[in-house]
Image: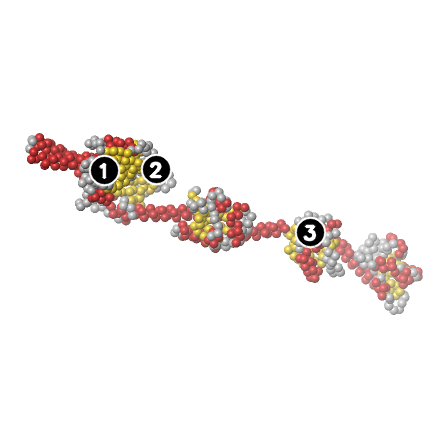
Amino acid sequence: MDNDVQTEEGLTPTGESAVVGLLFEHDENRRQLTKWFRELSAFTPCGVSPSGGSSQADILLVDEPALARHRDWLQSRKGRDEPPFHPIVLVHSRDDSSFEGGVWEIIDETVTVPIEPSPLKHRLENLLERRRLSKDLSTELERTEKQYRAVFESVNDAMLVIDAERNQVLDCNPRAREVLGYSELELRSLSVSTDLHPTNGDAYEQFIERVLTEGRGRTDDLVCTTKEGTTIEAEISASTLDVQDSSRVVFCIRDVTERREQSRKLESQRDQLAQLNRINRTLHETTRAVVQASSRDELETAVCQNLSDSGAYQFAWIGESGEEHNRVEPRATGGKAAEYLDHVNVTTDGTETGQGPTGQAFKTLSVCTVQDVSTASEMEPWRDSLAEFGVRATAAVPIHYDDEIFGILNLYTQRENAFVGEERDVLAHLGNTIGRAIADIRAREEAQIFQQAVEHAGHAVYITEPDGTIEYVNSAFTEMTGYSQEEVIGQNPRILKSGAHDKEFYCNLWQTVLSGETWENELINRHKDGRRQYIDQTIAPITMGSGKIDHLVAVNTDITEQRRRRQQLQVLYRVLRHNLRNKLNVIEGYADIIAESGQSEYKPALEKISQAVDDLLQISRQARRIERIFSDNSAEQEMRPLDVVVERALTDVSPPTDIVTTSLPETSLTVNVELQTALRELITNAVKHNDAEDPSVVVAMETDLREIGPQGTVTVRDNGPGIPTNERKVLREGEESPLLHGKGLGLWLVNWVVTELGGTVDIQDADPRGSVVTVTVPLGD
């Protein structure tokens, strides 16, 4: 064999001669062909020896004897699995072209002898072209295989080549080993359906069947199990690998566990956002209902109904802490809350029913939640009842504003992961919003009550800005002054000035109120018609919590008539105390002169005159005592033990007497010393008017310690003529008339003193005659 003409791969490059191997048993034919090929520059002949190993010829020519002798060797040459194409030409001497069937599996072309050079050359060129194309294809396939292998090895997805019929892994890339946790050898020994898909083997079998039927397939719901036993969610694409063996399938496994988790989180976030949007819409609607609500009941009912109808919550209710056993009493309900509350008890104390979210919200003034009522220990008292409604979670939202709690809003839902994050913040804000709205409604109601009270008050009230500009007047003001509201709104109170006060008087008024103090005094104003009015005025600054004076409120009482009556009484007092007393002294003096003259016929008249004078002087003295009591407040707060006050009243009885007996237990409870005046009057009256043959006056005292406060009782019992019925009726009615009046001032004095001390006077008939006067007064320690 001529090795100089061989090429490395048996492929003749362009421009070089092709190597033609000659395997002939017939020597003459071999010599002739060798000579002929050497004459052609396109071909280089060489001898072939099957025993010498693989031939490097580009094309092989054999004769029939050589074909028969070296058939197996030639068969092995043609039976290679990989390209390139190895052409074999049979040189034969037959006239026909019929050969046994197995020959055509070895040879590619035939040439008959004698050989015609031109047809042989043409056939050889055709076979060499096929070999060149085969060689190019082999090179391309090798290059492509390397490229695809590089992709197979470096791709980020796990890839498996599977024999679907045998349920085995044939090949895997590094990413598959990393994702699944197995080595390549371990993967090749696994059962794909049993080991890699133990949790969803049926789904895998259905998927692989579809791939084998359709040639390809894709799924995103298969779960793979790793060597450690963890599961991964996989997105799998698959296709059959080749036509000859359709059971081979290439799997592309993409681990989407993290992506799915993120997707679920995103979906959860979207759900939460949608939920928050519903809650925000509910909050907006609730806020609108709050603004439109005219009462607290209407507001709370609207809140519960809006929340229950929102779709976010099953039902809701608002409760406040009651006085009985710290029970939380429902104020408003929505949804099935009323049905639920019929079977449960909620408190705020330290018992089991006070440890739930409602009780805790009352204590902490913060939103308290339970995510799973079926497992939370604090929900034991209500677990069965909530299970009937399918409740999963609950929240208690304190309704409060400025540290004042108005109640608890209780919410119940079937949702998972409820009452967390922004929803919790929104609910906390909702509780504060409702609390502020309730406070506003209460303030508005109080303002309405105040306005109605002011409007219907018997006193004239007007409100001004700090500079004195009138903003509001009530109807009593217009009635008192004669000015309508339209005439005075926007004006200054100086329109009421009478000119009776100097500049210093008004400067003192303004300095007082602008310093934040209340001004009280009497002043003289002028009515719209010009009449003077005596006014008892109080002016107070209003700060509204801002630290500065925002308004001034003035309350005016017309004391013109009261002042006139006071002047009249003062004149009458003067006449009674001074003029009448002086005249009575004169009458008494002249009566004494007449009595000393010894004219006995005038004695009865003188006695009557003397008695009348004594009575009138007694009235004068009583009037002086009454005036002193109501004009002198120096002893108003002087307190002494009750038994001491009664003893001193007995000592002051004039004239002294020994017909009085007493029962006065010692006590440390005290009473205002003014009671002494009333008791002295009662005892003196009982002694003086007692006409019994054996006169008797009994003074008894006792004390009683009561829950509302201790009180003392002093009883004056006599056996005299008794107190007339009309005298008692006058005291009971509280006023006198021309037809119904008393004879003196004594009982009025007793009544005024005891009443002023907060006590009562009771007059009853004694048995068999006389009267029993009982005085009851409150006592101090």
Q: Tell me if residue 745 comes above or below residue 385 in the rendering.
A: above
Q: Could you say which quadrant of the image residue 554 lies in?
A: top left
Residue 52 vs residue 152, the one in the foreground: 152
Q: Amino acid at mark 1?
A: Asp
Instruction: Name the spot of residue 406 as percent of width and height, x first.
Output: 43, 46
Which amino acid, by three-letter code, is at mark 2? Leu
Residue position for label 2? 705
Q: If the image is split into quadrants, where does the N terminus sit? A: bottom right
Front-most of residues 335 and 74: 335
Residue 234 appears left or right of 441: right
Asked if one can make out residue 565 in the rendered structure from this viewpoint, the answer is no
Q: In the rendered image, which quarter is residue 717 located in? A: top left
Marker disc for residue 718: 1
Q: Name the residue beneath numbered marker 3.
A: 158
Q: Specify which label sits upstream in the sequence, 3 or 2.
A: 3
Q: Dot 3, how many residues are within 10 Å of its Cα: few (below 14), some (14-19), or many (20+)?
A: many
Q: Is residue 102 above or below residue 463?
A: below
Q: Earlier in the sequence, mark 1 or mark 3?
A: 3
In the rendered structure, find residue 519 and report the number of the disc placed on it. none
Name which residue type carries label 3.
Ala
Categorize mark 2 by other alpha carbons within 10 Å: few (<14), some (14-19), many (20+).
few
